[in-house]
Amino acid sequence: MVFGKMSSGGVDGGRYGAVGESSGGAGQSGIVDTMDGSIGVGLSGSNSMSNSSSSSSRSSVLVEEQDECGFMTHDVYQRQPLLHEKDAYEKDYDERMYKENCNSYYNGSGSNGMVKISMPTPHREEPRFPKEKMKTLIAFLFLFANWMLTTASLALTHERVPTAAPLPDITLDNISPQSWGLEVSEIMIIVSVYFCVVVVIFHKYRLIIFRRIFLIMGLLYFYRSITMYVTVLPVADPHYYCSEKANTTSVVLVLKRMVQLLSGFGLSINGQHVFCGDYIYSGHTVCLVISYLIVREYTPRRWWPLHWIFALLAAVGVVMVLIARGHYTVDCLIAYYITTRLFYIYHTLAHNQSLKDSGSNNFFERLWWYPLFQYFERNVQGVVPRHYEWPLPWPRRWSSKNPQRTS
C-alpha cells in the first residue's frame, strides 16, 4: 500500500493517495504527495461539508494519478480505510511485488502496454479418415487376383475329384435332397450382396470400408484356393452334373475353365458352374455371413430389425445349401469360423491404435497379412463413424455438406 498524508493534518487512507478532513476554515484544500511521486487532491472545509453530512464515513472523492507502469488511473477512494494499516515491511513487500508484476506482464519497450502471452499450437485430436483412392484400387486388385487364383484352383481340382460315394454326414444323411435349395440360397446371396453394396456406397467413408471388404474377401478367397486343392472330397450330391474330366492339364485348359467360371460369377444359377470339388470351404456360406457382418457393423444400432433379417437370411441360406447337398456340413462350419474370426480380428486391429504398431507384446504382428493391414489402415485413426451422405454430385439438394449422423 502507498500512503499519502494531507498537509493540513488529515488521516491516512487509500492506495495511491489519501483524503483527509482539515480542521481549518472553509475552502481549505490539501495536496497529497504519494510515495511514487503522483499527486492526489483532497477537498475539505465547509464547501464539501455542505454537500454531504459531516458524520458520514462513506463519502468518497476521485483521485486521478499516474501509476508506475505509465497509465492514468481514475479511482474512487473512501475517506475511511477498509483494511487495517500495514506496517513498513508489508508496505515494502507490496511495493516490490507491484513493480515486478509491471515488469513481467507489460512490454516496457513500447508505450502501448500490450500483454504478451505465448499460446501453444493447438493439437488436433479428432480422428482422421483419409480417402486414399490408390489404396482402394490396390485392395481391389488384391481381391481380383485371389478370385482368379480360386478359379484356377477349382479348374485343377476338378481333375482330382474322386468317383467314390458321398462321405457320411450327419445332416445330409437325415434329410431328403432338394435341388431347388441351391437356387434359393444363391438368390439370397445376390440380395444380400447387392444391399451391402448400397449400404457402403451411401456411407461417408465408403472408400475405407471398400478397402476392408476387398482385403478380407481377398484373404478368404486365398485360403479357399488352398483348402479346396489340398483335400478333395467326393461329390456330395450324386445327381449334381459335373463336366467330364480331361484327364490332363494344360495352361489353355485351365484358362478356358477360368473364363467360364468367371462369366457366371461362380454361381450355379447361371449354368456356368459345372466343375466339382470346391467343397472345403463353402463359398456360399462366406458370402452370406460376410454380408451380415458388414450390415451389422456399418449400419446404426437402431436398425436392429435389419440386422436380424440379415442374420435370418444367412442362416436360411446355409440350410438351403445343405438340403440341396451343395456342401458338406463341415464345409459350412469351417467357412463360418474362418469368416467371423478374420472379420473380428481385422476390425479389432483397426479400432485400436496401439495394435497398429509392431512390438514384442503385439502378437498380431505375427500374422502373415499384418503388413498388408498396416499399409491399408496406417492413416485411419479411430473407429469409422456411421455417417451417410448422397454419393453423387447431383442433384445438389440431396448433397449435404453435413452428412446425416446416425451412429
Image: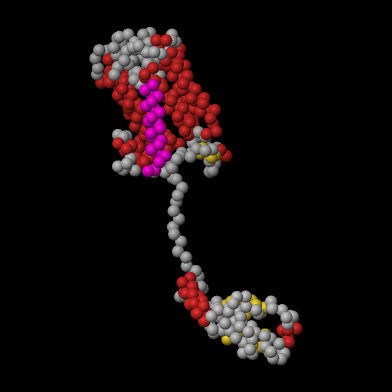
Dominant secondary-structure state across the stretch colored magenta: helix
Give percent across and percent down for residue 405: 53, 40
* First to last magenta residue range: 333-354
Q: Position of residue 34 (x, y in %)?
A: 56, 84
Rendered residue at 38%/23% (across/down): 335
Residue 231 at x, y = what percent? 29, 19
Note whether residue 249 is visible: yes
State the residue at coordinates (73%, 81%): 55
Report the side of 183 relative to 157 (left or right).
Answer: right
Q: Residue at x 65, y 84 (%)?
A: 20
Residue occupying image coordinates x 40% and y 32%: 344
Instruction: Say which quadrant the N terminus sits in.
Output: bottom right
Task: Give residue 3's quadrant in the image.
Answer: bottom right
Asked if 82 appears above or below 134 in the picture, the reply is below
Total numbered labels placed on residues in the image: 0
The answer to whether residue 347 is magenta is yes
Residue at far bottom of view: 25
Q: Is residue 272 among what the camera can see?
A: no
In the displayed structure, 23 sits above or below 200; it is below
- 103 shown above or below 152: below
Q: What colouring does the structure picture have? A: secondary structure
Most foreground residue, 373 or 75: 75
Q: Is residue 247 left or right of residue 345?
A: left
Q: Position of residue 238 (x, y in %)?
A: 36, 8
Relative to 221, residue 30 above or below: below
> Foreground: 243 or 308?
308
Determine if the magenta segment contains residue 366: no
